Every structure is written in C-alpha cells, then in structure tokens.
Image (cartoon, helix red, strand yellow):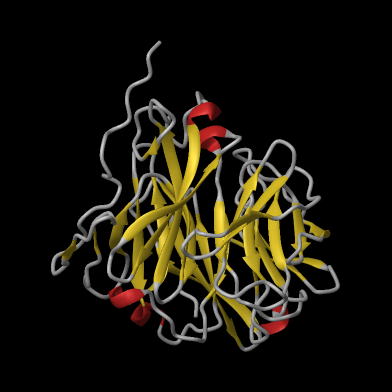
C-alpha cells in the first residue's frame, strides 16, 4: 500500500485575527501575530497536532507532531501520519518538531526528534527558571521511550542540544516536565508519568519523589504537575498532581505525604497563575494553550486581563473534556470554579504561562 504524500509547503502556520499584520522575512517562514480582542482564547497560530507550548517575552516554543515525507524530510501535514486517536500508528513515520516563533512572527524549526510510540506519543517541553543549577532560559524536552525517559536540553535557538542521561524507568508515552520554582523540592526538574513522580538534577541524577494512586483510564498515567506557591493555603509548597483517568487531584508534600485535595473530570494539567506579569511579544499572550485534533490544531492565547485577581491560584486543564478550572484559596480552603468551559477543541493539550 502506498501512503498518501504529505502536503507540500509550510502550511502549519496561519493568518490569525483581524487587525493582524502579515510578516514575510526570508529565510524565515511567515507568521501573522494579531492583536485580536481581549477576553477568552484568541487564535495565535495554526500548528499541526501541537502537544505542548512554552513561552518567554521574546519567543513562543511549540512541540508538535510531524509526518515524514519521502526522502526522510519531516514536513507538517496529515498524509503519512495518522491522527492522535488512530490505532494504526507507524512509528517509522512519526516525529516531533519544536518550533520557535519570535515576537515579530519569524518562525523556524529548531529541533526534530523521533517518537518511539508513534503518533500516540505526547512529548512535552518547559523553560528553565535558572534555579537549581539549570541554565536560565534553556528549553527542555521530555519523551517517553520503550527503555526509559529521554530528556533533551537545548538553547533557545536550537544551536546547542544535548541529551541528559538519566536512570528513570519507562513511564509510558505521555511524560510531563516542570521545574520547582519555590525551592520546596530543591529547585529540581519534576518528571511525571505512569503512576510516578521523579526529581531530576541538572546533570540527570534522578530519584523517585512519590507514587500517586493513579487508577486512570484511556491508557494514561498521571498528568502534568506543578509546585504550588507558598500562598496556596494548606498545600503551599506541595506538588499538585492530576490524574486524567479519575479526575483526582493530589498534593504531595515535601516530606512525600500524598493527599487527595479534590477532583475535576479529566483533570490533566496543573498550572499556577504567576504573580510576575509577563506576556509573549506584542500579542499580549499571558497563557498559551495547545488545541489538537486528528487532522490539525492550533495555539491559542489568553490575555493578561483574563486573570485579574487570580495570581497564585491553580489553573486546572481538562484534556478530554476541554475546559479550564480555577482553584482559589478562600479562608484557608480550596474553592473550585469554572474558568472556561466547552473549549472548541478536540483535545486540550499542554498549556503554559509566559515566563520571565
């Protein structure tokens, strides 16, 4: 059987909103970063099957699926790479690309990495805070592998890349990464997958932090965790971890006590609204989210004004029931409230606040 050819060209980035300005500068691809309207998600860029994002004021990074064209040159498209829900994935034709888009709309692929689990793979990225011995502003990518976990460190322009050896056992095809910005977990890199949380130092030294009573579904393990600021009520400084299969949300204390603190259907990622007000480029993007489907996807942005008065609160993303929930501290207790419901996406993949 002959597989269909991938579409030619660089069609994964699209003109965005009204009032946007088209930028064309060779040799960069062209991207339009529009001002859009405040309040709610605004289309920022069309990207084929994005699985995660990270951003600082000058750059947006997106990791997304590629399909391999004849000759082995990876290009975006749906031709030879089945959708995210396909049961017929060919790992020989599945890779992830990392895009870097600057504030003026210049975009390029800075890395391409093979996906061992085919197009069912979920690769994730995070920017280093510069604490704990991790170089500030460097991008880290994490992948599940049949043999373990692969961690790659790269400079923002992709000119420097290195693999970080580690002894983390296999955690499945959906492995997450974050950094401890509070210090309660030693400013370590935090890796989650399967039913385990691991702490990793800058040179790859790794130790298990805790096992989470994950009873999931859909073949998934625990979701993307985050370390809570000390202002987060009785769970300040704890690692907050979701389980998409059950919707349970757990707090892991620095002494490794695991406590269930609530639940939300499909809870898959935890973020904390920063107290430092940073946005990406001139678009005013404060929160960026990956929307993916079997045949396409996009990155959307939320403006800073959407989060007025919510600094220090937890934001919970639900992947399979696309929605966002706020967990706020009121009188020492946690209050859950809907932030955005019925998000127009087949899958809500990784999200990130812009960081300084």
Residue 225 visible here: no
**Residue plotted at (65% across, 44% down):** 144
Assign the N terminus to one quadrant of the image: top left
Q: State the residue in front, 244 or 146.
A: 146
Image point 68% across, 41% down: which residue? 172
**Residue 197 versus residue 314 in the image, above or below:** above
Query: So how many labels did they put on this image?
Result: 0
In this view, the residue farthest toward the top is 1
Q: Is residue 30 left or right of residue 168?
A: left
Left or right, 142 with reference to 197: left
Q: 261 and 178: which one is in front? A: 178
Q: Residue at x 49, y 66 (%)?
A: 352
- Name the spot of residue 225 as percent of width and height, x first: 64, 63
Q: Nearer the viewer, residue 197 or 345?
A: 197
Which image quarter: residue 264? bottom right
Q: Is residue 275 above or below residue 9?
A: below
Is residue 239 among what the camera can see? Answer: yes
Q: Identify which residue, 308 or 123, lies in the foreground.
A: 123
Of all residues shown, which one is farthest toward the left?
A: 19
Say which quarter of the image contains residue 314: bottom right
> What percent of the width, then of the height, locates residue 283?
29, 73
Q: Is residue 277 left or right of residue 182?
A: left
The x and y percentages for residue 222 are 67, 52
């Amino acid at each position: 059987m002959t597989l269909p050819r991938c579409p030619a060209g660089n069609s994964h980035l699209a003109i965005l909103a009204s009032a946007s300005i088209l930028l064309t500068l060779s040799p960069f691809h062209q991207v339009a970063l529009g001002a859009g309207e405040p309040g709610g998600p605004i289309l920022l860029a069309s990207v084929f099957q994005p699985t995660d994002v990270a951003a600082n004021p000058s750059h947006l990074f997106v990791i997304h699926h590629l399909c391999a064209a004849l000759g082995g040159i990876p290009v975006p498209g749906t031709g030879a790479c089945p959708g995210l829900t396909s049961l017929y994935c060919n790992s020989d034709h599945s890779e992830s690309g990392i895009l870097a888009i600057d504030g003026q709309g210049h975009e390029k692929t800075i890395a391409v990495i093979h996906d061992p689990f085919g197009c069912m793979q979920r690769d994730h990225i995070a920017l280093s805070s510069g604490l704990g011995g991790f170089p500030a502003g460097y991008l880290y990518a994490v992948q599940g592998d049949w043999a373990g976990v692969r961690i790659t460190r790269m400079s923002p322009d992709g000119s420097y890349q290195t693999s970080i050896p580690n002894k983390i056992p296999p955690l499945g095809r959906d492995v997450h990464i974050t950094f401890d910005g509070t210090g309660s977990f030693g400013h370590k890199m935090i890796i989650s997958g399967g039913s385990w949380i691991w702490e990793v130092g800058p040179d790859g030294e790794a130790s298990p932090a805790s096992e989470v009573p994950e009873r999931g579904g859909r073949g998934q393990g625990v979701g993307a965790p985050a370390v809570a600021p000390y202002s987060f009520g009785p769970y300040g400084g704890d690692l907050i971890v979701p389980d998409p299969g059950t919707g349970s949300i757990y707090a892991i204390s620095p002494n490794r006590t695991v406590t269930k603190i609530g639940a939300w259907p499909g809870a898959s990622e935890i973020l904390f609204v920063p107290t430092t007000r940073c946005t990406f480029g001139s678009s005013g993007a404060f929160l960026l989210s990956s929307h993916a489907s079997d045949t396409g996807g996009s990155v959307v942005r939320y403006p800073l004004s959407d989060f007025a008065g919510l600094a220090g609160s937890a934001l919970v993303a639900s992947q399979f029931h696309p929605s966002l929930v706020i967990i706020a501290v009121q009188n020492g207790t946690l209050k859950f409230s809907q932030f955005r419901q019925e998000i127009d996406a087949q899958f809500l993949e990784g999200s990130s606040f812009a960081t300084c």
